[in-house]
Image (cartoon, rainbow, N blue to C red):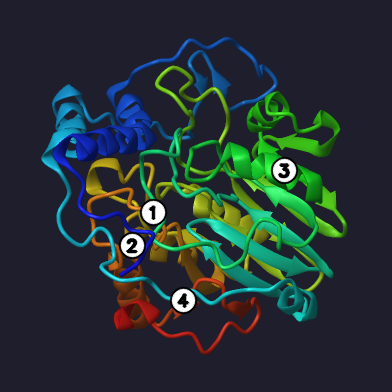
């Protein structure tokens, strides 16, 4: 059995864990219900900033109080169906500093959830780093990892940049960021997220905050913050005070799209027209539900986003690490894998920690079927 999966807890402990898990998704319910945080016009220069904070190009469809209450009930009391957590340890390929040093340029590694390590231009870049045991505001409760990271924070190489998509707990972990500050040259963030890092002690001069469609160069690699359809906030009271974004990553011999979190929207086609084709798209597929598909894509929408972006190879992320929804833990990978094969789309599904060549990511298998 996976020692990262907790044994059956007593009812009261399970209730507290469900409550902590709900904190990680409660902002979704608040956003759909139309709850508004206390905001001021902190970023008047941004076209994305309005009276109630940052906003999407298309406003998500509100759930309504009845659906919102049902969502809270499901998380806090109703429980989850069987299969949202793997029964056995999932496959992870350990990584070492030596392996990373010897890896060729154009190599990418899934480290779990949306944490991806890229080697470009002889340097390393990391997306949405979460090395904590739980994606939660506290480490004694909340969604727990299905697997350990394939390498430790100490074993990570020096990073030219950490690239952040937004400030939710499963994408931005405070302790991880603080640990990485000593070995990271630049933190690239959407507007407002960098200000949060400054409050955590990261020097402001090492932070670059970008609005949608703005770009910056770091060590010969260009990063462009592009739109996504999501929301932000780490409590019920700071909704949309920071921006969310996807990222276009352009090196001399590779072009990669990193989605962060997003629902499906017309922006994918615009990004594809302006920056495509992409050698590789790192697209979210996991923690979805039809009740919140405006901010998290369903598998068929992930496939369509890849086509809109004019991507060559599709790599699904945002799955296989945390229990954040009601679907089976392997359902996102299995469903998207089958849809992609049926549509003739090249999909790569590397084992966590395994190297993948950005331009020729062949030879991967549906590893979750062996679990």
x, y percentage for residue 186?
80, 45
Q: Which residue is mark 2?
A: 299
Contact flag, marks 3 and 4 (Cβ < 8 Å): no
Residue occupying the point 48% across, 16% down: 52
Element at badge 2? Answer: helix
Element at badge 3? Answer: strand
Q: Nearer the viewer, residue 310 or 340?
A: 340
Q: CA distance from mark 2 to mark 3?
A: 28 Å
Q: Mark 3: few, some, or many residues within 10 Å (few <14, many ≥20)?
A: many
Q: Nearer the viewer, residue 79 or 315?
A: 79
Closer to the chain start, of discs 1 and 2, is 2
Is residue 70 something that shows in the picture? yes
Element at badge 1? Answer: loop
Q: Is residue 366 above or below residue 323?
A: below
Q: Is residue 356 left or right of residue 106?
A: left
Q: Which residue is mark 4?
A: 349
Q: Is residue 4 above or below residue 346?
A: above
Which quadrant: the C terminus?
A: bottom left
Q: CA distance from mark 4 to mark 1?
A: 17 Å
Contact flag, marks 4 and 2 (Cβ < 8 Å): no
Residue occupying the point 51% across, 53% down: 268
Closer to the chain start, of discs 4 and 2, is 2
Q: Nearer the viewer, mark 4 or mark 1?
A: 1
Q: CA distance from mark 3 to mark 1?
A: 24 Å
Closer to the chain start, of discs 3 and 4, is 3
Q: Which residue is mark 1?
A: 322
Looking at the rendering, which quadrant does residue 47 occupy?
top right
Q: Nearer the viewer, residue 125 or 262?
A: 125
Q: Nearer the viewer, mark 3 or mark 1?
A: 1
Q: Mark 1: few, some, or many residues within 10 Å (few <14, many ≥20)?
A: many
């Amino acid at each position: 059995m996976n020692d990262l999966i907790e044994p059956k807890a007593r009812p009261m402990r399970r209730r507290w864990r469900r409550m902590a898990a709900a904190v990680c998704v409660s902002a979704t319910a608040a956003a759909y219900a139309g709850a508004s945080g206390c905001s001021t016009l902190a970023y008047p220069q941004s076209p994305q900033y309005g009276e109630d904070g940052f906003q999407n190009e298309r406003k998500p469809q509100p759930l309504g109080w009845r659906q919102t209450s049902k969502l809270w009930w499901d998380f806090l009391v109703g429980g989850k169906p069987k299969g949202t957590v793997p029964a056995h340890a999932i496959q992870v390929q350990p990584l070492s500093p030596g392996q990373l040093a010897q890896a060729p340029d154009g190599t990418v590694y899934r480290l779990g959830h949306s944490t991806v390590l890229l080697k470009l231009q002889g340097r390393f870049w990391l997306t949405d780093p979460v090395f904590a045991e739980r994606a939660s505001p506290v480490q004694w409760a909340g969604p727990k990892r299905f697997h350990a990271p394939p390498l430790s924070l100490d074993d990570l190489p020096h990073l030219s940049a950490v690239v952040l998509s937004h400030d939710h707990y499963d994408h931005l972990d405070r302790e991880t960021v603080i640990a990485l500050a000593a070995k990271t040259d630049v933190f690239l963030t959407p507007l407002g997220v960098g200000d949060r890092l400054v409050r955590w002690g990261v020097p402001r001069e090492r932070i670059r905050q970008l609005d949608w469609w703005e770009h910056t160069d770091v060590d010969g690699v260009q990063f462009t913050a592009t739109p996504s359809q999501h929301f932000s906030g780490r409590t019920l009271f700071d909704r949309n005070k920071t921006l969310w974004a996807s990222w276009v990553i352009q090196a001399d011999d590779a072009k990669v799209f990193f989605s962060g979190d997003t629902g499906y929207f017309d922006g994918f086609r615009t990004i594809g027209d302006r920056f495509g084709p992409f050698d590789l798209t790192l697209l979210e597929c996991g923690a979805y539900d039809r009740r919140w598909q405006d901010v998290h894509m369903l598998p068929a929408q992930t496939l369509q986003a890849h086509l809109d972006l004019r991507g060559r190879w599709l790599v699904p992320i945002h799955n296989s690490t945390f229990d954040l929804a009601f679907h089976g833990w392997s359902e996102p990978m299995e469903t998207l894998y089958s849809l992609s094969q049926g549509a003739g789309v090249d999909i790569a599904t590397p084992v966590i920690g395994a190297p993948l060549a950005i331009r020729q990511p062949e030879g991967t298998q549906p590893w979750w079927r062996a679990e």
